[in-house]
Image (tube, grey):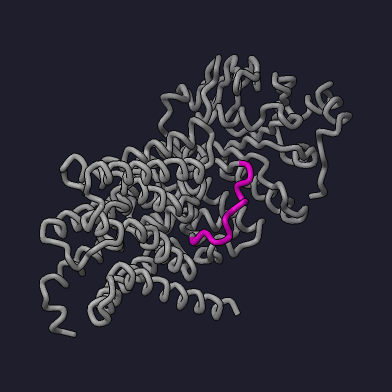
Amino acid sequence: MNEARELIRVEGVSFQYDSIPVLEEVSFSIARGDFMAILGPNGSGKTTLVKLILGLFRPTKGRVLLLGKSVEEFRAWFKIGYVPQKATHIDPFFPASAREVVAMALLSGPHVAGRGKKEEDEAVTLALERVGMAAFRNRPIGSLSGGQQQRVIIARAIVNAPELLFLDEPTAGVDAATQGLFYEMLHRLNKDQRITIILVTHDIGIVNKHVTKVACLNQRLVFHGTHAEFCQSEAFKTMLASGHLVSHTH
Amino acid sequence: MEAFFGYGFFQRALLAGLFVAIACAILGVFLILRRDAMIGHGLAHVTFGGVALGLFLNVLPLGAALVVAILASLAIMNLKERAGLHGDTAIGIFSSVGMALGIALATLAGRFNADLLSYLFGDILAIDALEVGLSTVLAAVVIIAILANYRRLMYLTFDREAAKASGVKTAHLDVLLAILTSVTVVLGMKVVGILLVTALLVIPAAAGLLLAVSFKQALLFSSLVASLSVVFGLLAAFYLDLPASATVVLFSFLLFVVFFLLRRKKLS
């Protein structure tokens, strides 16, 4: 694979938590423009893998390269957008406007240094427009619905025009109609803005409709390939049979 | 009233009181949102031990209290992280030990007297020029440190994990907040005393949070409540011949009630 196209490389990564193995010998790579789903049963290490890639955990073995750099040395965090699990479990009394929530991520990067209020406002407005939330910029985040909060959190994740966007079960607890709109928006970010997306999900409906690559975990990497290959794989059949995949109508 | 503002002791109390109360209010917003509101209460008890240590060793009690409070706040933070204890448990342990240490040392020093009582209940109208200078400068440092790290602290408070993934040094900010809280508690001790310092950290910030629709508003409203509490609290203390620590805190509660009623009206 062309190095310039490879944004993430995970090499022989293992991770233990309190001596309990969570991930073992996981290796794969993600290329620019991919829309990758990370699938697996509960406790299979999906969230842990994302946190290892983001440097939030340190692997007990192996290494992670982010945009060609070891994650320990990686400093260009503005190129990464992240929507954590339960990101919309927001304190309803937190006194931040949607604008302030998005602006939180304007912290680093050469294009941020020296940025004035006007440029900041433009960046925030653009991010909110992309998720259809510009009209809500001055509303307190706690007063928005779950779906709207989720869009604001996505706007925060894309305000720095990232190359990579990580989303960890972003639609948990959101109704099916809102989920549909949400994934259409992600699809546009991937196709129009060329943002590479890594999505942790249980939803096979999403995988079938939007995803181009699949990584399937169960402590070890049990499958890695294109969506078409996944649909023909043993991993797919096993997961479907064991009820680890759900399908919502979008 | 104009003549009253001309008194040197009042000017000193007002200047130090305003700076310290605003520092408490701004810091309080972050502490409340981090569910750490009671750390001020715990550190205030630890500070009692620090003051008693100062009196026992015959060194500046404010300095001794500052060192002890900073060490205790870092220890509370470590105990939470490394022993897996809940924050209130770690605070409970250190506040009790600090108080016990204070009682033992003050008794050994034979100075369980007016000196110690002035720290317990505060005595801002008796504050001297050196203490005004020290309190004002330290409070200004606290305010500047918070405002300089405003966005990072807000991000950390709102979404710790995402902040960390954005490159925010969350552990450094935790230490910064612990130190700033210790400094603020020690300063607040001079204004309202050890027993009421939590009020300065919690009540104005809680009032500000009731009406704020943005983080900036929360900081502004909290600072406003803190400032008005100091001004009217000092005036009431003078005219009603009451301890300033009590009147400042009671005024802040009065303003909290007003903000609470305004919020109810707004929601209805």
Residue B133 picture location, percent across and down? 14, 57
Task: Report the number of discs.
Answer: 0
Horizontal placement of A216 versus B203: left or right? right
Horizontal placement of B108 versus A183: left or right? left
| Residue sitting at x 78%, y 26% | A230
Residue B201 vs residue A129, the one in the foreground: B201
Horizontal placement of B143 versus A140: left or right? left
Residue B15 picture location, percent across and down? 19, 66
| Residue sitting at x 27%, y 81% | B240
Is residue A241 visible in the rendered image? The answer is: yes
Residue B109 picture location, percent across and down? 22, 43
Q: Main secondary structure of the magenta part?
A: loop
Q: Which residues are magenta?
A: A85-95
Is residue B66 visible in the rendered image? The answer is: no
Query: Dividing the image into 4 quarters, which one contains the C terminus of chain B?
Result: bottom right
| Residue sitting at x 41%, y 75% | B255
Residue A22 picture location, percent across and down? 65, 22
| Image quarter of residue B70 | top left
The relative height of residue A246 versus residue B232 in the rendered view (above or below) is: above
Determine if the magenta segment contains residue A188: no
Query: Dividing the image into 4 quarters, which one contains the N terminus of chain B?
Result: bottom left
Determine if the magenta segment contains residue A91: yes
| Residue sitting at x 52%, y 18% | A63
The relative height of residue B161 versus residue A229 in the rendered view (above or below) is: below
Horizontal placement of B3 versus A114: left or right? left
